[in-house]
Structure formats: C-alpha cells, structure tokens
Image (cartoon, rainbow, N blue to C red):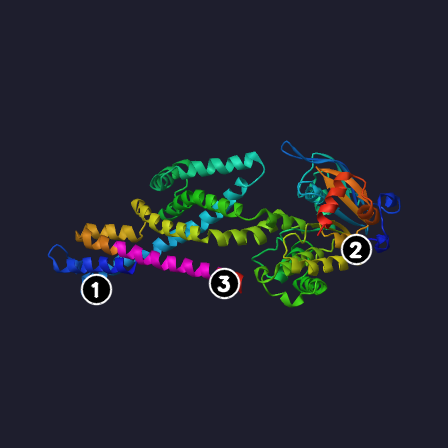
Amino acid sequence: MRILTVLFLSLLLSGCASSNWGWYVVDPTTTTGANNIRFLLSGLGNTVLLSLTAISISIVVGLLVALPGLSERPALRRFNRVYVELVRAVPILVLILWVYYGLPQVTGLAINVFWAGVIALALSDSAFQAEIFRAGIQSINRGQYEAAHSISLNYRDTMRYIILPQAIRRILPALGNQLVYMLKMSSLVSVIGMQELTRKANELVVSEYRPLEIYTVLVLEYLVLIMVVSAGVRWLERRMQADERA
Amino acid sequence: MHNHSARSGGTMQKATESAPAIEIAGLNKYFGDFQALSDVSLNVNTGEKVVVCGPSGSGKSTLIRCVNRLETHQSGTIRVDGVTLDGSRSALDTVRAKVGMVFQQFNLFPHLSVLDNLTIGPRRVRGLSDTAARDLAMHYLERVQIPEQADKFPRHLSGGQQQRVAIARSLCMEPQIMLFDEPTSALDPEMISEVLDVMVELAESGMTMVCVTHEMGFARRVADTMVFMDHGRIVESSPPDTFFTAPESERCQTFLKQILSH
C-alpha cells in the first residue's frame, strides 16, 4: 500500500516538471490555486453527509427487510426476495435519475437534490444491507435462539439483546465495505446537481480547463477520505473484539 | 410454589396425590419421514426426578425438547403444570416460564458477561430492576459456587464453569421444572463432577427435574424414576433399584452392560 502510494506520488511529481501538467490551478501558494482547492474541498461536507445519511437509512431498511427473509412464513420470505431482487437490479445512476425526475411526477412533491440522492442511494444499498444482515443473522448458532427461548425472551428481545449484537460484530467488515462503496457511489449524485466533491471538480474543470490536475486532486480526495473511513471501521472492529475479550 | 415434600420417589401411581408437573400422552414426533418419537407417554410429578437414558438417536433429547416446545410435536398431548401445549402463544409463554433448560453445549450468550447472561431474563421477562436482577444473579452464582466469575465473559471460563453459569441462568427465571439435555456430555471428565454436584444439590432442594444423561452414578443417587428409550419409544420406566438390578427388556440390559462396563 505504502509502496503504491509512493509510486503514484512520484509519478505525479515527475509530471510536475513536464509542460503537459498545469499544477498552478491547484497551487496553494497562489491566490487562485488556494481558492480552487478551497472550492474543491467545499464538496467534502456534502459527500460525507449524503453518504452517512444514506447508509444510516439503508442499514435500518436493510435490517427491516432482512428479518422477514428469516421468517417461517413463506409470504414474508417472498417479500424479502422480491424486494432484494427488484431493488438490486436497478443501476444506482438510473435510480437517482428516476427518484429526482420521476418520483415528483408520481407524488406531486418536489424533492430537493440532497434528499433525492439520499433516497436513491439508501434504497439501492438497502437491498445489499438486507442480504448482509440475513447472512449475519443466519450465521448465529441455533442454540442461541433456544437458550433465549428457554428463558422466555420474546422475539424482539431475542433479536435486540442476543442475536443482533453478535451478528453485527460478524458483519462489521461487510458494513465497512458498504460504507466505502456508498462514499464512492455518492459521486453519481453529481449528475442531478448535488454540490459534492465530484460536482465541484466538474464545475472547476469547466472554468479552468484543467481536467487532468483537477480530477487527480479529486481522486486523492476520495482516496484520503476512504482511507480515513477504513481506519475508522478497523478501529471499531478492534474495539468490539476488545469488548468481548475484556 | 411447588410441593417440596413430593420428592420421596414419586412414580406414575402417585399422580393422584398432586397434579403431575408434566403429563405426556401418546406423543408422536416426526422429522420429515423419520419418526423420532412413537407414542410416548410419561408423567412427572412435582418434585420427582426422572433420568432418561438410551442410545443416541433414541429420541431422549427430542422428548425433553418437546416439553418446552423447542420442538413441535405432530400428535399427542403435553401438559405442563396443567397447561396444554396446543401451539398457542399464551400456552407457550406460560410453559416456558415454568420450565428451565440446560443444554449440552451450554449456549451461553458469548457477547454478554456472566452477570448479564444471568440478569437479561429477569430484567426483560420478569421486569426486575437492575439491582434486584443483580442480587438474584449473585444469589444463584453463589449457589453454583462461582460468584467470583460474575464479571468475566463465558469464553474465559472452563466448560464446567460455563455449564454451571448456564444452570444459574435458568434458575434465575425461578422455574418449577428443570430439563437437562446431556449437561455433562460436552465436558472434560474432570469437570463433570462439579456440574453433577450442582445438579444433586438442586435435586435435594426439591426441584422437579428431567435429566437426559448417561451419568449412572448421578442417576442412582437422585433419580426417582429411570426411563430407558430406544427408537423413539419408552422401553422401560422403573425406579432405579429395579432398573439397575433387574431391567426387563433385553435392549435395556445390553445398554446398561455397555455403559456400566468400565
């Protein structure tokens, strides 16, 4: 990982000397460059807010869809299958366009760009979350349910206090994956005008005509953001394991 | 609560004295095409200790798992303290509140401390306050002689300690009947006695117990009735004196010879 980063940076830096590069657009020592960097970074808050809101919703919806998938009743299991198959078959970009341009025509309610993005991303991700939760819950030994039943815990308490805490520990790496995925997919919401990282870069490219440098900065922005998030997820995993070992 | 004095060797004939704690009649249970229980009938009186033994696959675990409906039966009746397990939610809740169960694999909750394993039921089901639940838990941990392990996690305990925690967890629900499903089968030999000691103590306190176990020393010591099962049927049911000295069926004689030969 470290070697790759060094290689990548040295490639960029060697390019600085060549006349093809125009790093002045993002040179922090100049006023324009510094302003441009500020402009690019100003999308960060929206990217993070959009992704975190969407994944919070998709985790809740995913869990609510996963539970009927584990039911003994065929009708409930069928609901789970239909939801998962249907939702995950729609490309995220298509869903974004449909929610933003299509949904207001059905509901008569105008949705702003942010919430259209959140709804589309959350809906799309919820199908995957549902499968992750189903797998996690199914991985818990039957004996845990039996023990919970034998001390009369009802379904809700069994899930809340016994099954889910164990399942969530197991699916944490997968949840981390989805968060990274969500951060990247949030770039698609730029097409409907959401002012996040990618949109800012696009707008700057239009005014500065320097796509190579600006998109390179964009790549680095996502890279750093996702490395920070990954480290956060790892820390959480370690902490939860430590909890158990305490 | 239940009648402690009924301990003295209650068998089926004593059913008239007090209402049986468990009445099983004509029980049939299938797993797909396989018949796990065939026409099983068994009464357990309040305070009675029944030890169920038999070769593996004979249906003994299935039988006690039917009593608190971890398995559903296809026909026959099961009545626990007068409540018939008819598939209704209310009957199930009533019966599970009366019946505690100890499993072969302990089934402790690995993400909860010993104390939380014990208090979760009292707090969530019986509505006890945190302090009351804690006091109750410590009371039963002392009874199974491991109060010092309260703050540890199950994985830090030996198998014997884990099983004693599991017993204490059941007792915290203050059941009238305890079911034991091969409680010592997963244990290293040197840990078996510490679990059996707890079970003997429990038996002496007057608890109604149904134990699936091959620990014949324990059975001799506490059982009022021995039940031998084979191929999903109760082959023999008699007081331990008769059972160990003069088993009627050939199948039971062979079985006893095998497990008592060492």
**Mark 2, chain letter?**
B
* Residue B137 in which image quadrant: bottom right
Question: Looking at the picture, do discs 1 and 3 lie on one chain?
Answer: yes
> Would residue A83 be found to the left or right of residue B117 on screen?
left
Residue A47 place in picture, x, y as percent: 34, 53
Residue range corresponding to the magenta coloring = A218-240
Task: Identify the residue under disc 3.
Answer: A242
Indicate whether residue A226 is drawn in magenta: yes
Left or right, A236 with reference to A163: left
Identify residue type, mark 2.
Answer: Arg
Q: Report if residue B24 is visible in the image.
A: no
Residue shown at the point (33%, 57%) measured from the top left: A225
The residues bearing labels 3 and 2 have C-alpha atoms spaced at a distance of 44 Å
Q: Which percent across, then down, holds residue A55? A: 42, 50
Residue drawn at x 71%, y 48% as measured from the top left? B259
How many marks overall? 3
The one nearer the camera, A154 or A106, is A154
Residue found at the far front of this picture = B261
Residue beneath the point at 28% across and 50% down = A199
Instruction: Reply yes or no: does residue B110 show up in magenta.
Output: no
The front one of B147 and A15 is B147
Q: Secondary structure at mark 3?
A: helix
Amino acid, disc 3: Ala
Distance from disc 1 to disc 3, alpha carbons, whole Å, reads 43 Å
Q: Secondary structure at mark 2?
A: helix
Query: Could you tell me the amino acid type at mark 1?
Result: Pro
Quarter that holds the N terminus of chain A: bottom left
Per the rendering, the mark at residue A28 is 1
Q: Position of residue A169 (x, y in %)?
A: 49, 54
Q: Return the residue at label 2.
A: B221
